[in-house]
């Protein structure tokens, strides 16, 4: 039996009140997707609104392209999946072995507040299935609780740093800072040099610091689902 992983993408495309667009970060979908699918893992994509999720336009800059994003651009199978993401409310955790959340700024607005997403993460986690998040995606854990306690409380975690947010000049635009939220909710937060690959595993919770960490998070996830 092939292992199956659910990827949850944002449906949110407005960058606060700037008039600019946001969405998911392509590298954070593409690199983990291939890291897992090349090992025979089946991957399904879901989003709150279903259909084609918005891509963060900055992640399509030539400077942000990687081998994985170029491969994604010319991959008819993945493009088809992207055009037809499943409706998050219709997805069931029992159909999958793990869940993975790519980042981009979009999730801070929709998935962080999404009750369906919160329940889904709780379901995976309480059924001993890995939950993985990279870059801004640890932000979706903001209100996730297990037995009344924040899931991240007392757990080793990482996520997009305040200084990385500052570097992209969005500190005053985002609804909250990932690093601050993880600390406030009792997470044992750590980071390394900005923009360097860094992933933290605590039991079945996996978090990555930034876009460069996305493949690392996928490799840790692969170890857990084996």
Image: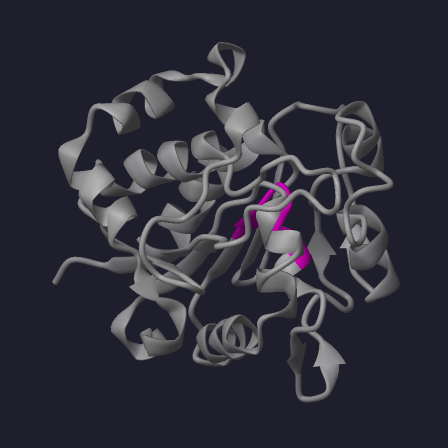
In screen coordinates, is 174 left or right of 34? Answer: right
Of all residues, the one furthest to the left in this rendering is 1
Q: Position of residue 56 (x, y in %)?
A: 53, 35
Q: Which residues are magenta?
A: 133-139
The picture quadrant where one finds residue 33 is top left
Judged from this view, the residue extending furthest toward the bottom is 147
Across and down, in percent, residue 208 comes to: 60, 42
Name the residue located 22 percent from the left edge and 40 percent from the top edge: 78
- Is residue 136 rendered magenta in the image? yes
Q: Residue furthest front?
A: 19
> Is 37 left, or right, of 35 in this rendering?
left
Quarter of image, res 211: top right
Q: Position of residue 60 (x, y in %)?
A: 46, 22
Of residues 99 and 89, the one nearer the viewer is 89
Asked whether 188 falls inside the magenta stretch, the response is no
Name the quadrant containing residue 224: bottom left
Residue depicted at x 34% and y 59%: 6
Q: At x 75% / y 81%, what residue is drawn?
A: 149
State the quadrant of the N terminus: bottom left
Q: Residue 3 versus residue 80: which sits nearer the camera?
A: 80
Q: Nearer the viewer, residue 104 or 7?
A: 104
Locate residue 109, reporting x and y percent: 65, 57
- The answer to whether residue 177 is seen in the rendering is yes
**Toward the viewer: 63 or 138?**
63
Of all residues, the one furthest to the top in this rendering is: 63
């Amino acid at each position: 039996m092939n292992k199956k992983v659910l990827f949850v993408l944002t449906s949110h495309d407005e960058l606060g009140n700037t008039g600019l667009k946001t969405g998911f970060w392509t590298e954070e979908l593409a690199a983990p997707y291939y890291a897992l699918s090349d090992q025979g893992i089946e991957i399904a994509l879901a989003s709150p609104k279903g259909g084609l999720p918005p891509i963060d336009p900055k992640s399509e800059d030539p400077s942000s392209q990687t081998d994985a994003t170029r491969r994604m651009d010319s991959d008819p199978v993945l493009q088809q999946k992207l055009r037809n993401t499943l409706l998050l409310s219709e997805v069931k955790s029992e159909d999958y072995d793990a869940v993975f959340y790519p980042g981009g700024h979009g999730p801070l607005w929709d998935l962080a507040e999404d009750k369906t997403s919160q329940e889904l993460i709780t379901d995976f986690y309480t059924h001993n299935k890995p939950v993985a998040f990279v870059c801004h995606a640890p932000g979706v854990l903001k209100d996730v609780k297990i037995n009344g306690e924040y899931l991240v409380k007392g757990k080793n975690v990482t996520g997009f740093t305040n200084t990385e947010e500052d570097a992209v000049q969005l500190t005053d635009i985002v609804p909250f800072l990932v690093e601050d939220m993880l600390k406030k909710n009792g997470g044992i937060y750590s980071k390394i040099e900005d923009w360097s690959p860094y992933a933290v595993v605590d039991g079945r919770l996996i978090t990555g610091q930034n876009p460069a960490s996305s493949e690392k998070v996928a490799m840790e996830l692969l170890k857990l689902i084996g």
